[in-house]
Amino acid sequence: MIVQRIANAAGWLPMPATAVVIFLVVASVVPQLELAIGPVRQALPFYLLFAVAAPYIGASMARLFGLNTARRRAMAFSCSTRNSLVILPLALSIHDAMPVLPAILVAQTVIELIAESCYVRVIPRLVRSTGRNRPLV
């Protein structure tokens, strides 16, 4: 019984730990925000465009390959959560971006986290059940 309670409590630890880390990262970037407002404003439309387009691209690719519903949803979500992998190389390629880079990356991360919480509701509506939920083996 005690082991089960410990296991249940440990299952909730990643959530508050992630929240603390994000808070600390954002707090460390706040002093640079005044300097970074312009570049962050310029980058936000690209973050938002990626956040909206990626689930459709992932779902379309999965449909193209004939995947079942569960795999189509997984591919749509997986494609959608790759924003940081797309943005980081682009951000690092910007000349003289180092002073504002942390703020730009934190803004991207916040947009991605908000989008991911929306994907939990949106992707099941985007990828309707096909009735082919058995594994493709």
Image: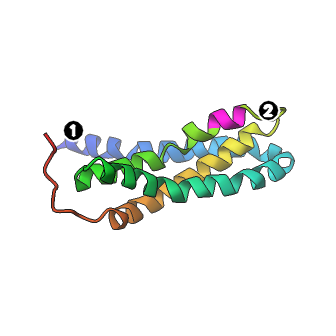
The tag earlier along the polypeptide, 1 or 2, is 1
In depth, the one of 50 and 16 nearer the eye is 50
Q: Is residue 114 visible?
A: no
Residue assigned mark 2 = 98
Query: Looking at the image, which residue is at 60% across and 47% down?
Result: 109
Residue assigned mark 1 = 3
Q: Quadrant of the N terminus?
A: top left
- Where is residue 121 shown, x and y percent of the image? 39, 65
- Where is residue 132 shown, x and y percent of the image? 16, 57
Horizontally, residue 24 falls left or right of residue 137, namely right
Q: Label 1 vs label 2: CA separation?
A: 47 Å
Q: Quadrant of the C terminus?
A: top left
Provide the major secondary structure of the magenta segment.
Answer: helix
In depth, the one of 22 and 3 nearer the eye is 22
Identify the coloring: rainbow
Q: Is residue 28 above or below residue 92?
A: below
Q: Is residue 116 magenta?
A: no
| Residue 131: image tag | none
Residue 99 falls in which quadrant of the image? top right
Horizontally, residue 92 falls left or right of residue 3, namely right
Q: Is residue 108 above or below residue 121?
A: above
Dot in front, 1 or 2: 2
What residue span does the magenta drawing correspond to?
88-92
Residue 28 falls in which quadrant of the image? top right
Which kind of residue does numbered mark 2 sit on?
Met
Query: Looking at the image, which residue is at 21% across and 62% down?
Result: 130
Query: Looking at the image, which residue is at 13% across and 51% down?
Result: 134
Neighbour tally class for label 2: few under 14, some 14-19, many 20 plus, Cα within 10 Å = few
| Count of all numbered marks drawn on residues in the image | 2
Q: Is residue 89 magenta?
A: yes
In depth, the one of 10 and 108 nearer the eye is 108
